[in-house]
Amino acid sequence: MGRNGSGKSTLSKVLAGHPAYTVTGGTVMYQGQNLLELVPEQRARLGLFLGFQYPVEIPGVSNLEFLRVATNARRQERGETELDTFAFEDLVTARLAVVQMDPAFLERSVNEGFSGGEKKRNEILQMALLEPVVAILDETDSGLDIDALRIVAGGVNQLASPGNATLLITHYQRLLDLITPDHVHVMAAGRILRSGGPELAHELERTGYDWVDQELALSEVG
Amino acid sequence: MTSTVVGDLVAQPYKYGFVTEIETEKIAKGLSEDVVRLISAKKKEPTFLLDFRLRAYRQWLQMREPDWAALGYPPIDYQDIIYYAAPKQQSKKASLDEVDPKLLETFDKLGIPLSEQKRLSNVAVDAVFDSVSIATTFKEQLAEHGVIFCSISEAVKEHPALIERYLGTVVASNDNYFAALNAAVFSDGSFVFIPKGVACPMELSTYFRINSGDTGQFERTLIVAEEGASVSYLEGCTAPMFDTNQLHAAVVELVALDDASIKYSTVQNWYAGDEHGVGGIYNFVTKRGQCRGARSKISWTQVETGSAITWKYPSCVLQGADSVGEFYSVALTNNRQQADTGTKMIHVGPRTRSTIVSKGISAGHSVNSYRGLVQIGPKAVGSKNYSQCDSMLIGDQAGANTYPYIRSQQSDAVVEHEASTCRLSADQLFYLQSRGIGFEEAVSMMVSGFCRDVFNQLPMEFAAEADKLLALKLEGSVG
């Protein structure tokens, strides 16, 4: 959690390898490898997933084909067989239930003309297919009405398992009413200012971020 | 686009760049009235054709090479070109067994098997090697339906009346500089005739192969669909890699009578020159279809990926009432390629309709121009045109231009033009990559997506081919 501009989205994009960001120092260790040395597609194949705040529209590229190619890239990395069109359709039909998505969206171009809620469902569908080890969901709740929020949160909960981790970036308690976090971290000025349990989110809901300025000011003096 | 370097990946070599060692009969370089007469004599042509050639040659002498296209190239020395070359075989063979195995092997290598066992099951192929037709498959089967599919040289001998009636009636011998040159010296090409009421039972295809390094290529294709007839025709083209440029000046004429429909698709993959712009084909082509009859339809689909220079405007003259013209184009340029391509839709008859969908993709240091004319004549009441021209830029060194010309002499005509330019966006690429899709595959998915509207128009067997071709051409161009 954290205010706008505190570095949450930057962190997620850096982890996923967005080309607009240059990392000037430090390492990111993931499964014994420095993530920063890998190209974005390799990070994804190894199980890192970024749920976009603003999923990108790609006209002309079929959503179904996109999902299949992506799923196969991940499967290949895990030493699993590639799925042909038919086997994949079975899999994707099963996974659609996680986000209660209309199969008609598979036939359309990737995110093209999707509503905000549909785009976010499509993100969670991708997550359900790719079975990431670490999923970063960047403001997945933004722009969602309450029903869509429930569906998306339900999807995230269903996919959670002891073998994976989810990093949720959010401004609002309302998402955390539906997904109970194990840990809450508050970011400011590009670093983690405070960490705690779910109660920290409740506290933020009551007090807002004014205390952040004070702590930042103190830390600068210090 | 992004901070990563453009073109740091090794480009895929042009896989059709080999030369076939074969004995050819060539005449001396240069062009004169004697050369025109010699070509005609070698082909034992009737007088009407020799007259047609001579008239064209004299007109050509009076004409000037056009310079209005957005193309730059050194002057072409027309006396430094060989105007007739043919693989040494006595005459066109009755059976494939008699065709030089080297030629069959060449087409095998190009993925166009001609032999009985291997050939495509539902596509009849006319194979043209250095402007001479060497074999045509499925001729007998087609003949049962009354369909004539053969080389134009054969047609001149066997169906002279049809040739005399239609040749040069769509693209006149003095239509333009390159068309006049073609009319004077054309060597071969394909002829298709679909009689009244016949839907051609299979796809027809001509595969053009340039082999010689110093020979000009001048094919001429004529397709006639009589009343109610229909045909789908595809041409493919490749050439070896030479560090010199070869001139290719072809003419294609289509005639559609009442209720006839002709679908003409091209996958053009002539050698494009290397990354510094050395070598490659100069492609100056005149293609025009005439919807002569009421409710006739002519549809052009082209996928242009090759040639150093492309100058090409497949057009429709919509003469018959309620006739329909279509133009679907993907033009991809990379490295130093230059393309000035588009269409002309000439609405003459009432209630004629035309659709133009053009997708230009420019990568490397290339320049890709769309040039199109929509003309609505005074009698074309209730006519409509819709044009859509989209350009995609890859990297930051490539150029895209759009030159739409609209001339309407009808107050009630509806002419729509939409244009867009986009850059292959880094965000879209990153989105695909972040899902585990490799960089090049991501590019190829997006480019195919951009071209989807056009690829959907291609015969099914070739749509996948076109997809692969684009991916291959773009390999290493995005970074």
Image (cartoon, coloured by chain):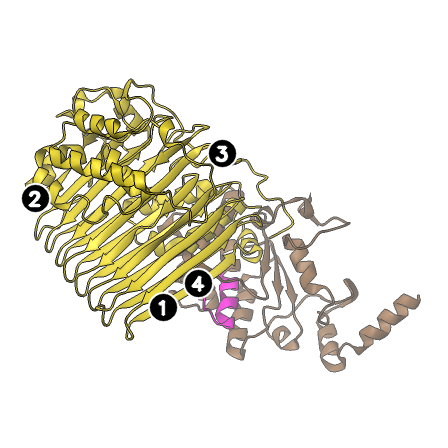
Chain colours: A brown, B yellow
Q: Are marks 3 and 4 in contact (CB under 8 Å)?
A: no
Q: Which mark is residue B416?
A: 1
Direction from residue B58 to residue B79 in the image, left or right: right
* The quadrant where residue B65 appears: top left
B140 over B327 or under it: above or below: above
Say whether disc 3 or disc 2 marks the residue closer to the N-terminus.
Answer: 2
Label 4 to label 1: alpha-carbon separation? 10 Å
Q: Say what amino acid the circle numbered 3 marks.
A: Asp
Q: Say what amino acid the circle numbered 1 marks.
A: Glu
SS for dot 3: loop
B102 over B12 or under it: above or below: above
Say whether disc 2 or disc 4 marks the residue closer to the N-terminus.
Answer: 2
Label 3 to label 4: alpha-carbon separation? 31 Å
Q: Which residue of the protein is positioned furthest toward the top in this rendering?
A: B23
Label 1 to label 2: alpha-carbon separation? 41 Å
Q: Which residue is mark 2?
A: B145
Q: Which residue is mark 3?
A: B274
